[in-house]
Image: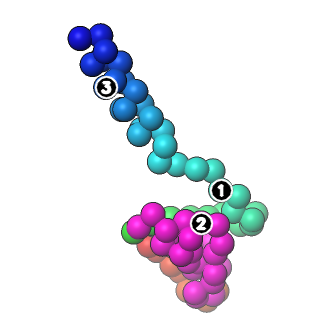
Amino acid sequence: MRNILFLFYFLFSTSLFAQWATQNSGTSATLTNVFFPTGNVGYITKGNESLLKTTNGGSTWSTIASAGSSYEI
């Protein structure tokens, strides 16, 4: 019984904390909304300045729409 509890604890605790990784945003602007429909593709809004997209899990970002509108994702 003790081995089963240990195995359950190990599997649950490692999967619980393995989902997030800290990324440097590379900007001092306020990042207001974040949406990742998959593990690699994600969108982020930078205040009312721009809408950014990543296709590699947040390692690099490209601007897909710039200032002039308010973006909500």
Residue 69: give x, y in percent of width and height: 55, 86
Q: Tell me, yes or no, whether the highlighted magenta stretch contains residue 63.
A: yes
Q: Amino acid at mark 2?
A: Gly
Q: Quadrant of the C terminus?
A: bottom left
Q: Are marks 3 and 1 in contact (CB under 8 Å)?
A: no
Residue 56: give x, y in percent of width and height: 56, 71
Question: How far apart in space, not on screen, are marks 3 and 1 (Cα)?
Answer: 30 Å
Residue drawn where x is 47% and y is 48% of the image: 19
Residue drawn where x is 42% and y is 31% of the image: 13
Q: Which residue is mark 2?
A: 58
Q: Residues within 10 Å of mark 1 (few under 14, many from 20)?
A: few
Residue drawn where x is 45% and y is 63% of the image: 39
Q: Which residue is mark 1?
A: 23
Describe the element under mark 3 as helix, strand or loop: helix
Q: Earlier in the sequence, mark 2 or mark 3?
A: 3
Q: Is residue 51 above or below residue 25?
A: below
The answer to which of 49 and 43 lies nearer the viewer is: 43
**In front of the other: label 3 or label 1?**
3
Describe the element under mark 2 as helix, strand or loop: loop
Q: Amino acid at mark 1?
A: Gln
The answer to which of 63 and 23 lies nearer the viewer is: 23
Left or right: 11 with respect to 33? left
Q: Which residue is mark 3?
A: 8
Q: Are marks 2 and 1 in contact (CB under 8 Å)?
A: yes
The answer to which of 13 and 25 lies nearer the viewer is: 13
Question: How far apart in space, not on screen, are marks 2 and 1 (Cα)?
Answer: 7 Å
Q: Earlier in the sequence, mark 2 or mark 1?
A: 1
Q: Which residues are magenta?
A: 38-66
